[in-house]
Amino acid sequence: MLEFRHLYKSYRASPFALSIGNLTIGDGEVVGLLGANGCGKTTFLKTVMGLVDGFEGEVLVDGLPPSQQYGRMAFVTEEGSYFPDMTPMQYAAFLADFYPRFDRGRYDRLMAFFDLYEDEPIRKLSKGQRAKVEICAGFSKGAKYILLDEPFLGKDVFARRDFLKLMITSLKRDETIIVTTHLVDEIQHVIDRALIIHKGMIRVDMPMDELHEQGRTLEELLMETTGYKANRYREYLEE
Ligand SMILES: Nc1ncnc2c1ncn2[C@@H]1O[C@H](COP(=O)(O)OP(=O)(O)OP(=O)(O)O)[C@@H](O)[C@H]1O
């Protein structure tokens, strides 16, 4: 379980702070963290990973600070691999040494699914392929909490759809996912719960079943919450 208690983090460069009152994310939940550019999604994930200093409040991972739970968490970011000179095979061996619960079978199955070459250094792969290697790693570390920050960047539409299906069908019971993305259409039938952040605060926390029952789409909810106006560009053209 992830618990947030009065989390508050401001940046001088940002006009608003990330401010999360009380929030709990239970084991096995697949949560979509949504919102406009700069609203605080990555900062939220980084606090869970213990990568943010100087915030008020508390984040607990199964009752402990993130710094005591690194082995239980995987963070897949658009920044890609920190080990570009390794081949995916060497990377797997490294992960196996580092993560006691590393699942080599799952890594190999994901690599095969994405048609990735195992013998080329990661830096020689395309941007989308490098991102796929990170997904293979993230889902194979044996982490209970898998945080995905824009995992679809650079992936073609087929890879995105297949990956989502694979992710959902291969999840283990207590694996908990938090995924940020701007591709709301693609994840709306994948996530269990939507959190929408607007200007640093969670404005919507809704189970997807409830949204589907209301006959509304995630995109509509996001637009209503963030005040996005589809024809706003006209105001600029008509001035
Ligand atoms: N290390 C930092 N130093 C200064 N400001 C930062 C830092 N990290 C984030 N910010 C600011 O905090 C705000 C939230 O940023 P964050 O990266 O969390 O947004 P985001 O929702 O992930 O955006 P995007 O959708 O563009 O990825 C932004 O205004 C950003 O400029």
Image (tube, grey):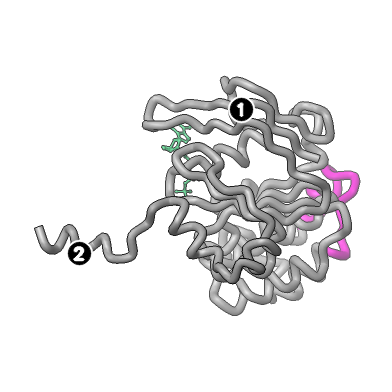
User: In the visual, does 11 lie left or right of 62?
Assistant: left
Res. 226 mark: none
Q: Is residue 102 magenta?
A: yes
Residue shown at the point (68%, 47%) measured from the top left:
75
**Picture quadrant of residue 155:** bottom right
First in sequence: mark 1 vs mark 2? 1
Residue drawn where x is 47% and y is 52% of the image:
225
State which quarter of the image contains the N terminus: top right
- The location of residue 3, given as percent across then percent down, is 74, 34
SS at circle 1: strand
Q: Is residue 120 magenta?
A: no
Q: Residues within 10 Å of mark 1 (few under 14, many from 20)?
A: some
Residue where numbered disc 1 is placed: 7
Image position of 208 with respect to 33: above or below: below
Q: Quadrant of residue 19?
A: top right
Q: For the residue marked with disc 2, what is the amino acid? A: Arg
In the rendered structure, which amino acid carries the disc numbered 1? Leu
At x 61% / y 71%, what residue is drawn?
A: 160
Please give the residue where the numbered disc 2 appears in the rendered image: 234
Q: Which residues lie in the magenta part?
A: 90-106
| Numbered disc 2: secondary structure | helix
